[in-house]
Amino acid sequence: MKTLILIRHAKSGWHESGSTDFERSLNHRGLKDGPMMGRRLAARLDTGNLKLDGFFCSAARRAASAACLL
């Protein structure tokens, strides 16, 4: 059976004036919480006998940054 895991990007900032939605970056909390969420995902993959076959990510700055933290 195939399993699909959907992950939302970490907290991002709305304070950047002149930035488009696509260009928004992670805020301090997102940068801090991202690695923790990566560890939690890894633990669930280990205990659930799941194998990660692929990882797809939006090209939006906040999503790509969060993916790098995982």
Image (cartoon, rainbow, N blue to C red):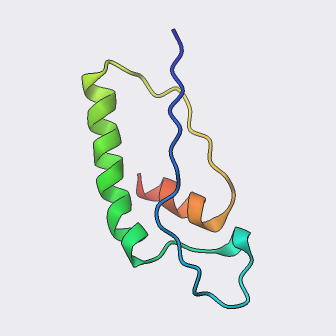
Residue at screen point 50% across, 53% down: 67
The spot of residue 53 in percent (x, y) is: 52, 26
The spot of residue 55 in percent (x, y) is: 56, 38
- The picture quadrant where one finds residue 4 is top right
- The picture quadrant where one finds residue 31 is bottom left
Residue at screen point 59% across, 80% down: 14
Q: Is residue 20 above or below residue 60?
A: below
Residue with the most extreme front position? 14
- The picture quadrant where one finds residue 25 is bottom right
Q: Is residue 52 above or below residue 22?
A: above
Residue at screen point 56% across, 32% down: 54
Residue at screen point 53% across, 38% down: 6
Q: Is residue 18 above or below residue 61?
A: below
Residue with the most extreme top position? 1
User: Which residue is at the front of the view, 8 or 47?
Assistant: 8
| Relative horizontal placement of residue 43, taking residue 17 as reference (left or right) | left
| Relative horizontal placement of residue 46, taking residue 68 as reference (left or right) | left
User: Which residue is at the front of the view, 30 or 49?
Assistant: 30
The spot of residue 42 in percent (x, y) is: 32, 38
Residue with the most extreme bottom position? 17
Q: Is residue 50 above or below residue 37?
A: above
| Relative horizontal placement of residue 33, taking residue 4 as reference (left or right) | left
